Image (cartoon, rainbow, N blue to C red):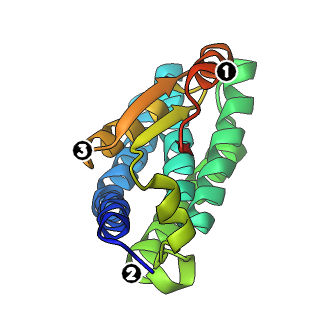
Amino acid sequence: MPTENNTDISDKLAELQQRYYAQLPERINEIESLWQNYNIKSPDESLLNDLHRHAHTLMGLAGTFGAGQLSSVAKELGHFLKLILEQHKTLSEEESDVISRIVCHIKEQAEISIHSPHKNGRQHQWSDYEIQKYNGHNLIYVVDDDELVVQRIASELDMANFEVETFSGNDKFFEACEKNYPPSLL
């Protein structure tokens, strides 16, 4: 049976999810803008790095907040860009077309995620068990090798009044877990 604390935590988690979906169009616009700037201005590797970072961030956040298909497409873009960046080469026309198609697919999946929450599992109802894990504990560890992803997720959690500790590497994370294992980990 839900308690007042359970409801409060469930409300906070739902608020985080709503905020994510409200900000999703802006995130997609950033990705489109980076790709357009790369195509229009010049083949600047720093723009591809930024695009890769945004795709990686979108992948993690979309997966966290229930947009699995969007997360998969963003992951596809991130992996493709990573391969190109590792080779330090100028994009071929074929590679450019692939990226354009993936960016379009990301936009389509974002629209579906925003307008059809039931199809993407977005209408998540937090179980009493999930809520009970957090009851009285608002500490969440956020771990990722991408510092930007860590900071964005931490910022969202912080705005929802969760206590957040961030880690960009496993060593510090494991040390922290030995001292205080958190009720939640992202």
Quadrant housing residue 30: top left
Q: Which residue is identified by label 3?
A: 159
Type of residue at label 1?
A: Phe
Q: Residue at x 63, y 47 (%)?
A: 77
Q: Earlier in the sequence, mark 3 or mark 2?
A: 2
Marks 3 and 2, how far apart at CA: 25 Å
Q: Earlier in the sequence, mark 1 or mark 3?
A: 3
Nearest the viewer among 15 and 128 is 128
Marks 1 and 2, how far apart at CA: 39 Å
- The circle on residue 38 is none
Q: Which residue is identified by label 1?
A: 174
Marks 1 and 3, how far apart at CA: 26 Å
Nearest the viewer among 13 and 53 is 13
Q: Residue at x 67, y 14 (%)?
A: 171
Task: Please say if 132 is above or below 50.
Answer: below
Q: Residue at x 53, y 21 (%)?
A: 45
Q: Earlier in the sequence, mark 1 or mark 2?
A: 2
- Report helix, strand or loop for mark 2: helix
- In this orientation, does residue 43 appear? no
Q: Which residue is identified by label 2?
A: 115
Instruction: Give the quarter of the figure containing the N terminus.
Output: bottom left
**168 with respect to 47 (left or right):** right
Mark 2 Cα within 10 Å, few/some/many (few <14, many 20+)?
Answer: few
Q: Nearer the viewer, mark 3 or mark 2?
A: 3
**38 with respect to 29 (left or right):** right
Q: Residue at x 56, y 63 (%)?
A: 70
Type of residue at label 3?
A: Met
